[in-house]
Image (tube, grey):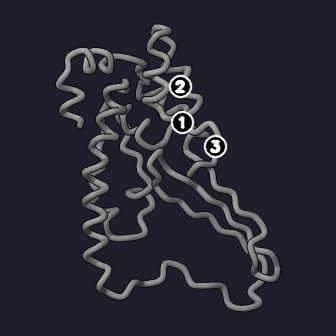
Amino acid sequence: MTDLALGHSTVRDRFAGTAVLRTAAAREIGCLGYVVRASGIPDDARVTHPFTRYGTRLDVPVHDGGDVLARFLVRAEEIAVSFALIEEFAEGLAAPMAMLAAEPPPGAGAGTGVGLVEGWRGTIATRVELAPDSTLARVKPVDPSFFNWPALPVALADTIVPDFSLTNKSFNLSYAGNDV
């Protein structure tokens, strides 16, 4: 599909140079996921906060154009990375799985924790609070769109109005903020 789309000069021409999010702006805003990786910053929770051995050798796609084309390419290349991870995890299913976290002992009481995972839009942070009886008191996931929304108007600064829809979809932000 990527070759088909980019094989048409009209598509490639529309993508290239449109809605550029420069590296410095992406860093300053604190962008996440494919948006930041399309601006040349290799941030990815699977690498910076690995919970399995793949974090040390995962080759995440990074492009430095910062435009619609770079965001498209990072997303397209991520498909191959995802398939490779699925294959690796499927091979390991026959072996017993180690627990990543132990269940709290009965009567452990209140507590808090934070979890990080790389979702398709970027890093999803989730804070969990346990009540004194060890039941869930509060769970708050934060969609990466929360961090990427401020980058959209920055990328649109030098973009013509007809390219708004293309730019908006290249960021593919959550309007609800909780569709992680």
Q: Which residue is identified by label 2?
A: 152
Residue drawn where x is 25% and y is 15% of the image: 10
At a point 81% along the width and 83% down the height, the residue shown is 133
Res. 173 mark: 1
Please state the horizontal and vertical placement of residue 170, each as a whole percent of the image: 43, 29
Looking at the image, do the residues carrying marks 3 and 2 touch, with CB atoms under 8 Å apart? no
- The mark found on residue 177 in the picture is 3
Q: CA distance from mark 3 to mark 2?
A: 15 Å
Above or below, comparing residue 125 to residue 19 in the picture: below
Observer-nearest residue: 98 or 91?
91
The residue carrying pointer 2 sits among few (fewer than 14), some (14 to 19) or many (20 or more) residues within 10 Å by Cα, namely some
Q: Amino acid at mark 3?
A: Gly
From the viewer's perspective, is 28 left or right of 109?
left
Mark 3 or 2, closer to the camera: 3
Q: Quadrant of residue 22?
A: top left
Question: What amino acid is labelled 1 in the image?
Answer: Leu
Picture layout, residue 54 above or below residue 14? below
Q: Secondary structure at mark 3?
A: loop
Q: Amino acid at mark 2?
A: Leu
Q: Eyeballing the image, is 175 above or below 104?
A: above
Pointer 2 with pointer 1, Cβ within 8 A: yes
